[in-house]
């Protein structure tokens, strides 16, 4: 394990397990079942999937961390790497850091573990899996692995069996065989000599309701909760599951989802649907967001609310589709031609994907503007056991025009900047929405006064709005502050906790509303702060530059940034913070 | 339009009414187009023509005692695809002079007169023949009106169509 | 003669569908007639202007929405069909027209055109085809003859023209017709029929550009009423359209493909019921 492992309970929370194997070995299923079993046993957990580029049969690993309290990162290292086979698993070496306290489990019939894993000093424990499964006719090898891993984590066998039963779709005979394989794996772990010493879960009774959910599902759910009833979208990794979850869900609540021919169609379709009065949304990733830029600009200029969820992945261009990165920030906050103010929000956790997407719907509708939700592959495709996200109660509510008003002007210059929108079907207040600059009465105009007025209006409506406290999660005190956004928040939080335990006084700001930048609130949050570190997962220090370009941070703000595909880990951040505080 | 197909005077007059409306609409469109292109003189002229056609339409309504105009009756095509009294949309030019506009109006009125004249000659039912004759005479009056108007309007210069600027970019 | 069924009396007049905004089209532009035809068609259909959406892209003809008194949407270049699809699927109760030119529709909009025909959502797409990019001052469009000389493509594009009726038919449009701006009443009748016909109705209107294609004045001497009546047999329509010279006016195909199913708006369950699938 990491040499900087402190002794506090905070850092020791949980056990981290990697299940690896090539296609057909079923490690993803095993990981999902492990998570479900932990949930049944009253624990929390997080599962991250990683795989090769093949559609089928490629190498894959399920990375699972279980703990007695909510888990939002995989921590610094793995207690167990269990591989059903070793085909190409060396590819995951970077993602599965091991140490002297870790255990490597492999099938002796599949050969030796790759040197890169053995070199960490981890203990190797052989486990005959394939032969065991073969002997129990009809059983699958991943059940043996599941049993072993569950036992190692300290999960009760009953919880594992219940998880398998709940998910079972293949008939009673096969079930019996697989439960036997599970038991064999479980017993094998119990029988290892000397016993494997890794942190185990305390047995916690399940007394609060829990959800098992991915960030993509949470975002979709939050959108529907907020009032979205029309989606048009184009499949793209890693956003596709969000859309696939929403398709039947929307239908159930009376909404519609259309698969469009491309992202250009998607964004224009939802602008059209929203023009019709229905809260609309699409989801995409970096390349799709780039294609949508013109359409998002149309939403700005025509003052049509839309929500665009960008599940960020490695960029630029096609980049690294199945890996996470926070490198679309620059594009989201400034990537539209013209002066085009828009909303950008970033959920800080899988649970927050629901809350923040719901908020984005509310904001977009209230402000008649596009809102980009910066999720990412890590949040989107990871599954977590969470406490059910509270309903903020915020719903799509648009300021609409009353019928038959002869004085109606769609783009009237109001004090708030928000002007009532006539919804098609309302008599007496018809107008033509336009991407062209326009007068207050929606007539196309190239006049300087009109342009100035409308630019001011579109900026003002976003600037004057009261966003409340959700703009950032702030805690702690001191003259040093760490600022971050999005999925890195969890790792940053863990690192800050460790640093505080070391005696450092730190303020933590995890920013949720990125645009419009809440300068006044940020200034207040940084009162008394003389040292700032900005932490983010991209190569260009995009957030650091954005803040510096739009706000007077205390002198010489420091940036800790690293691109994907590997997640920022609490250990490395703790180290970076420690060095930064020493130097200050 | 086959006069045999017209069963009643009402139907005939509904088509005549539609023709007047088409003409009024066309002159209005042309007037608007000219106004937008800063050809005020011709715009005013077309508006006057539109008003004349509009009055003619109202006249028909009053004569027929209709409370509401007949709905959705299309004027028949004549000597081409357009209704008889409409100036063809593409016969105009943004730099045209009032004389040109009157020339177009003249041709339109003459065509309308021809239309009703043919109808009068081939109509079987007496009320229709009578109405067609009245309409023809009206149009012939308009012809005279326009001819007289043309004497008060200067002939266009030879280079009326020359624009030293190439077509402008629209927005 | 109209063979369109007449809407009940006391419906709107064509004038009620025109806004007070004066078009900026050149005097002589065919689009004036098409606008007039659209207002006549909408009067025939009989829905009030506030229940009609008119969606367009970018180009001279795409300015049409603001010239009507309906709910207009003037979107970006080539994406009118996408915006209109979104509007119709979100609001199936509205009548939605889509308007634009040959560049907007067949070049940058080509992909959306093909998929809109496939999808067969109940829309009416009216393209004002003048074989040129007018707004940008005279470049060839996909329907421009291959040897038409221009500044941007001297000597001509050398590229075979796009055949919109062929593509529409092949991609699955449920109604395919051609009209001529020089025949406003005929165009109005065709548009009304197109609106009434379920599914994706496509009307290509030859609409001369007086400024950049003055030779198109000849069209009125060349176009002819289609020698064959509309068919509902796609194979027959396909044979006809492959020998079409681009000057036949009338309805080519009025088919029976079922239209894209529109959401009836019934919610089978509430949002809270969705939580069940996450609960452990």
Image (tube, coloured by chain):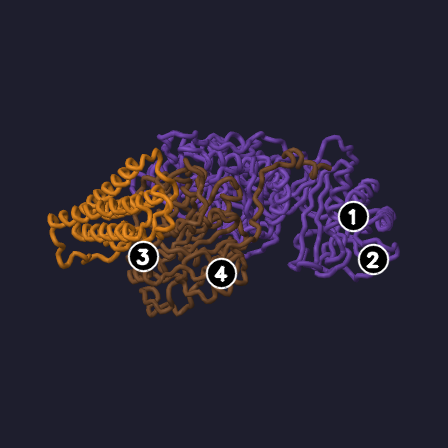
Query: Decide: marks 4, 2 in contact (CB < 8 A)?
Result: no
Q: Nearer the viewer, mark 3 or mark 1?
A: 3
Q: Colour of chain B?
A: orange
The residue carrying mark 4 is C167
Q: Quadrant of the C terminus of chain C?
A: top right
Chain ID, mark 2: A
Task: Please provide percent x and percent y for residue A371.
Answer: 50, 40
Q: Which mark is residue A169?
A: 1
Chain letter tied to brown: C
Whether discs 3 and 1 lie on one chain: the answer is no
Whether discs 3 and 2 lie on one chain: the answer is no
The residue carrying mark 2 is A130
Q: Give the Cα separation between the discs numbered 1 and 2.
A: 22 Å
Q: Give the Cα separation between the discs numbered 3 and 4.
A: 30 Å
The quadrant where residue A160 appears? top right
Of labels 1 and 2, earlier in sequence is: 2
Position of residue A447 in the picture relative to residue C175 (left or right): left
Chain ID, mark 1: A
């Amino acid at each position: 394990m990491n040499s900087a492992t402190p002794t506090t309970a905070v850092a020791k929370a949980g056990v981290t397990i990697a299940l690896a194997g090539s296609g057909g070995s079923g490690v993803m299923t095993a990981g999902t079942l492990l998570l479900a079993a932990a949930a049944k046993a009253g624990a929390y957990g997080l599962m991250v999937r990683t795989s090769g580029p093949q559609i089928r049969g490629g190498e894959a690993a399920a990375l699972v961390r279980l703990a007695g309290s909510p888990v939002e990162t995989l921590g610094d290292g793995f207690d167990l790497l269990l591989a059903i086979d070793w085909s190409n698993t060396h590819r995951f070496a970077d993602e599965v850091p091991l140490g002297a306290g870790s255990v490597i489990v492999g099938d002796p019939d599949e050969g030796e573990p790759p040197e890169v894993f053995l070199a960490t000093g981890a203990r190797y424990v052989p486990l005959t899996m394939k032969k065991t499964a073969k002997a129990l006719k009809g059983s699958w090898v991943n059940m043996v692995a599941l049993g072993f891993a569950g036992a190692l984590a300290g999960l009760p066998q009953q919880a594992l069996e219940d998880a398998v039963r709940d998910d079972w779709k293949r008939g009673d005979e096969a079930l019996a065989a697989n439960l036997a394989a599970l038991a064999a794996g479980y017993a094998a772990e119990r029988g290892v000599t000397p016993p494997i010493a890794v942190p185990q879960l305390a047995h916690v009774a399940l007394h609060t309701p829990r959800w098992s959910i991915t960030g993509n599902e949470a975002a979709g759910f939050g959108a529907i909760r907020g009032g979205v009833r029309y989606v048009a979208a184009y499949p793209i990794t890693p956003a596709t599951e969000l859309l696939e979850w929403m398709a039947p869900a929307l239908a159930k609540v009376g909404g519609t989802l259309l698969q469009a021919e491309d992202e250009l169609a998607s964004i224009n379709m939802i602008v059209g649907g929203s023009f019709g009065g229905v809260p609309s949304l699409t989801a995409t990733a970096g390349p799709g967001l780039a294609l949508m830029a013109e359409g998002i600009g149309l939403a700005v200029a025509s003052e049509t609310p839309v929500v665009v969820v960008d599940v960020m992945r490695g960029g630029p261009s096609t980049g690294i589709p199945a890996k996470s990165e926070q490198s679309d920030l620059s594009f989201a906050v400034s990537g539209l031609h013209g002066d085009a103010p828009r909303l950008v929000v970033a959920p800080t956790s899988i649970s927050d994907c629901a809350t923040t997407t719901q908020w984005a719907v509310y904001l977009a509708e209230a402000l008649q503007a596009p809102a980009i939700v910066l999720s990412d592959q890590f949040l989107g495709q990871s599954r977590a056991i969470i406490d059910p996200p509270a309903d903020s109660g915020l719903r799509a509510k648009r300021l609409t025009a009353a019928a038959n008003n002869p004085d109606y002007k769609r783009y009237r210059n109001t004090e708030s900047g928000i002007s009532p929108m006539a919804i098609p079907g309302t008599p007496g207040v018809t107008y033509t929405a336009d991407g062209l600059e326009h007068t207050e009465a929606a007539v196309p105009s190239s006049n300087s006064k009109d342009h100035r007025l409308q630019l001011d209006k579109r900026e003002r409506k976003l600037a004057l709005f009261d966003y409340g406290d959700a703009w950032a999660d702030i805690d702690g005190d001191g003259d040093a502050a760490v600022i971050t956004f999005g999925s890195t928040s969890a790792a940053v939080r863990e690192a800050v906790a460790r640093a505080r335990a070391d005696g450092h006084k730190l303020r933590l700001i995890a920013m949720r509303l990125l645009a419009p930048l809440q300068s006044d609130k940020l200034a207040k949050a940084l009162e008394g702060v003389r040292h700032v570190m900005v932490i983010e997962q991209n190569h260009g220090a995009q957030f650091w530059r954005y803040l510096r370009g739009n706000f007077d941070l205390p002198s010489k703000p420091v940036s800790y940034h690293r691109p994907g595909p590997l997640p920022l880990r609490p250990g490395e951040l703790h180290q970076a913070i420690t060095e930064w505080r020493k130097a200050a | 339009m086959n006069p045999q197909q017209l069963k009643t005077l009402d139907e005939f007059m509904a088509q005549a009414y539609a023709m007047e409306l088409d003409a009024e609409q066309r002159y209005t469109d042309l007037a608007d187009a000219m106004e937008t292109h800063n050809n005020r003189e011709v715009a005013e002229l077309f508006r006057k023509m539109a008003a004349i056609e509009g009055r003619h339409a109202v006249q028909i309504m009053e004569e027929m005692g209709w409370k509401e105009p007949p709905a959705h009756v299309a004027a028949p095509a004549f000597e081409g695809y357009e209704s008889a009294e409409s100036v063809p949309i593409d016969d105009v030019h943004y730099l045209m002079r009032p004389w040109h506009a009157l020339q177009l109006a003249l041709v339109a009125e003459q065509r309308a007169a021809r239309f009703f004249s043919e109808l009068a000659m081939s109509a079987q039912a007496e009320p229709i023949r009578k109405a067609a004759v009245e309409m023809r005479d009206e149009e012939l009056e308009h012809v005279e009106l326009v001819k007289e108007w043309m004497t008060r309007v200067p002939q266009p210069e030879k280079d009326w169509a020359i624009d030293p600027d190439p077509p402008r970019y629209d927005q | 003669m109209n063979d369109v069924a007449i809407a009940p009396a006391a419906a709107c007049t064509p004038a009620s569908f025109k806004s007070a905004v004066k078009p900026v089209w050149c005097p002589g532009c065919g689009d004036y007639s098409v606008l007039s035809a659209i207002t006549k068609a909408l009067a025939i259909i009989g829905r009030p202007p506030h229940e009609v959406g008119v969606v367009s892209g970018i180009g001279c003809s795409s300015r049409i929405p603001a010239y009507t008194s309906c709910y207009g949407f003037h979107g970006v270049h080539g994406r009118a069909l996408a915006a209109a699809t979104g509007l119709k699927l979100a609001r199936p109760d509205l009548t939605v027209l889509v308007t634009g030119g040959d560049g907007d529709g067949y070049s940058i909009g080509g992909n959306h055109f093909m998929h809109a025909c496939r999808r067969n959502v109940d829309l009416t797409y009216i393209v004002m085809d003048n074989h040129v990019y007018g707004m940008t001052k005279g470049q060839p469009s996909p329907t421009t003859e291959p040897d038409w000389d221009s500044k941007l493509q001297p000597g001509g594009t050398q590229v075979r023209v796009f055949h919109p009726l062929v593509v529409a038919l092949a991609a699955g449009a449920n109604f395919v017709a051609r009209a001529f701006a020089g025949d406003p009443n005929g165009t109005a009748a065709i548009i009304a029929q197109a609106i009434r016909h379920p599914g994706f109705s496509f009307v290509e209107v030859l609409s001369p550009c007086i400024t950049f294609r003055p030779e198109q004045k000849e069209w009125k001497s060349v176009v002819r009423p289609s020698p064959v009546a509309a068919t509902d047999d796609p194979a027959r329509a396909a044979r006809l359209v492959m020998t079409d010279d681009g000057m036949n006016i009338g309805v080519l195909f009025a088919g029976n493909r079922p239209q894209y199913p529109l959401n009836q708006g019934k919610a089978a369950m509430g949002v809270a019921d969705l939580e069940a699938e996450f609960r452990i």
